[in-house]
Amino acid sequence: MKQVTIYSDGACQGNPGPGGWGAVLIHGQRRKEIAGSCPATTNNRMELTAAIEALRCLKEPCEVAFYTDSKYVQLGMREWLPGWKAKGWRRGTKPVKNQDLWQALDHEAARHRVHWNWVKGHNQQPENERCDQLATQAIDTLRQELGPEGLRTARQAMDQA
């Protein structure tokens, strides 16, 4: 089974606000960087999206050492997910937040053997820092493409949803 190391990060300028995500995938000497954005989102949604998109890049089942600076993602996948599934995606009387993304991440992770690791963010870890740069650059590009009015419209649509 192929061994892959993945680092991911999500960012949001305002929470909610415009967000970005980035990931670095490493297999031997090969390295792939991916990133994306959303005009109106939350930091947690971007963290989850980064993990989903990184795992989607893997074309075959892999042994994955996954590093995230999000305790939300790491604890969710290591500890909380089985309970949420057993309780019909509920936390007490309320539905699990970001259920759509948790289900997508669960689906992608099920194809692999993933070891979920937490790394302290903004702590000079090169790949984590690069993921943060990718996420921030994605937000910057989005801001340039949409402009203030486009971001305002996206935020209003999110508030009404």
Image (tube, helix red, strand yellow):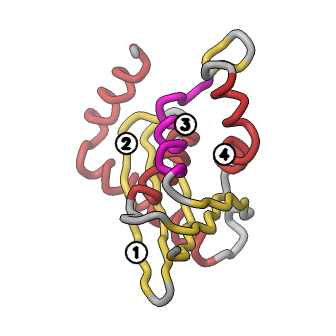
At which x and y percent is residue 14?
Answer: 53, 38
Q: Secondary structure at mark 2?
A: strand
The residue nearer to you, when weighing 154 against 45, is: 45
The magenta region covers 96-110
Q: Give the residue furthest to the left.
A: 145
Mark 3 burial class by Cα count in 10 Å: few <14, some 14-19, many 20+: many
The residue carrying mark 1 is 32
At label 1, which amino acid type do we have?
A: Lys
What is the C-alpha distance between the residues marked 2 and 1?
21 Å
N-terminal of the pair, mark 2 or mark 1, is 1
N-terminal of the pair, mark 1 or mark 3, is 1
N-terminal of the pair, mark 3 or mark 4, is 4
Residue 109 within the segment the image draws in magenta: yes
Find out whether the residues at labels 3 and 2 contact each other: C-beta distance under 8 Å.
no
The residue carrying mark 3 is 102
What is the C-alpha distance between the residues marked 3 and 4?
9 Å
The residue carrying mark 2 is 38
Which residue shows up at 31% across the image and 56% down it? 141
Q: Can residue 33 be seen in the rendering of this structure?
A: yes
